[in-house]
Amino acid sequence: MRMGEFNNVEYRDTEERILSGREDYRRIPVPGEMRDRLEAGIARAEAERKRGTEKEKRKRIRFRAAAVAVAAALFVVLPNTGADVAHAMGSLPVVGKLFQAVTFRDYQYESDRFDADVEVPQIVADDAADDAEKAETVEQINFDIEKVTNQLIEEFQASAELGESYGTLEIHHETVTDDENYFTLKLSIYQGAGSGYESYKLYTIDKRTGKQVQIGDLFREGSDYNELLSENIKDQMRAKMTEDENNIYWVDYSDVPEWNWKGLKEDQNFYFDEAGNLVVVFDEYEVAPGYMGAQEFTVERSVFEEILK
């Protein structure tokens, strides 16, 4: 039976067996129920963003005003579920070079069985009103963030109202890159329901063009960047497993070859560190068993510098 077919009771039983036997744990690639819920929420958000009605588009155009107007226009009051729920406008952080992150909504919830600590950010640009490309990029990212976080909050609230189990929702953000070329906002998402699942959404803007970029946009066409970076990461995985037998990654796994990590996704999460190295970010269970947690691998700039655009 696949993990996605487990019900709640079966999943908790499986988790107990995992904790009591490392070998069993190694053979479980993903907690289906938790991951399916998050991925479904993100997928629905992306579909709605792409379909976007003309009314929604006109609404998003108003984001081209100043930063305070952006935050005010996006303030959302969600229904109170009966426990202490607080929504508050955040403070504008120190002004960056071109872009900055604003915590425009703070959602808190606490009961005997459920708790939530959510910071919902938005990106603002100091000169977006005079740059149509930049304004459109900021609007698209902010719309995606709002859709994703609203979906997760609504699902959490629905579970809390039933009150039949336990649940945790945490969403936080940080700016992980802000140099002369790129701005990257990292959205960290944690969902807990007996067992936890940690995932990320990273949004990178090329400051030179004002456009959002995917990892493939960084490299020259025909450079075969995916194989180069993926093999480097696989080598790092192998080295870590050699150093410590408790390190397990889905690479060279002959027992169940289909579990092996194939390579970077088109929308792979990434950011540049302060030294200009590329940091590739993986959700929990994406390349390793759950006890390994979420994973990040740093690819040295010297590995890919010659194929950068």
Image (tube, helix red, strand yellow):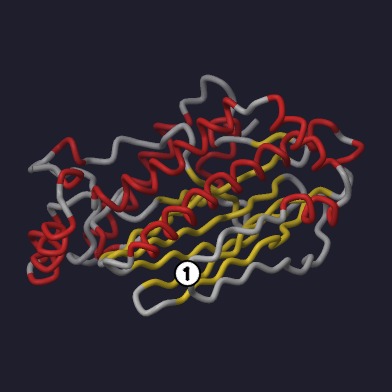
Q: Assign the N terminus to one quadrant of the image.
A: top left
Kindly state the secondary structure of the residue where label 1 is placed: strand
Question: What residue lies at 34% left-to-right and 75% top-to-bottom?
Answer: 113
| Residue 236 horizontal/vertical position (percent) | 34, 52
The answer to which image quadrant residue 273 occupies is: bottom right
Q: Is residue 158 above or below residue 22?
A: above
Name, please, the residue furthest toward the bottom. Answer: 112
Q: Is residue 13 left or right of residue 239?
A: left
Check disc 1 and report the residue beneath it.
116
Q: Looking at the image, which is closer to me, 280 or 170?
A: 170
Q: Residue at x 55, y 56 (%)?
A: 187
In this picture, is 69 found above or below 39?
A: below
Residue reaching furthest to the front:
82
Q: Amino acid at mark 1?
A: Ala
Whether residue 197 sits left or right of residue 252 in the image: it is right
Quadrant position of the C terminus in the picture: top right
Q: Image quarter for residue 53?
A: top right
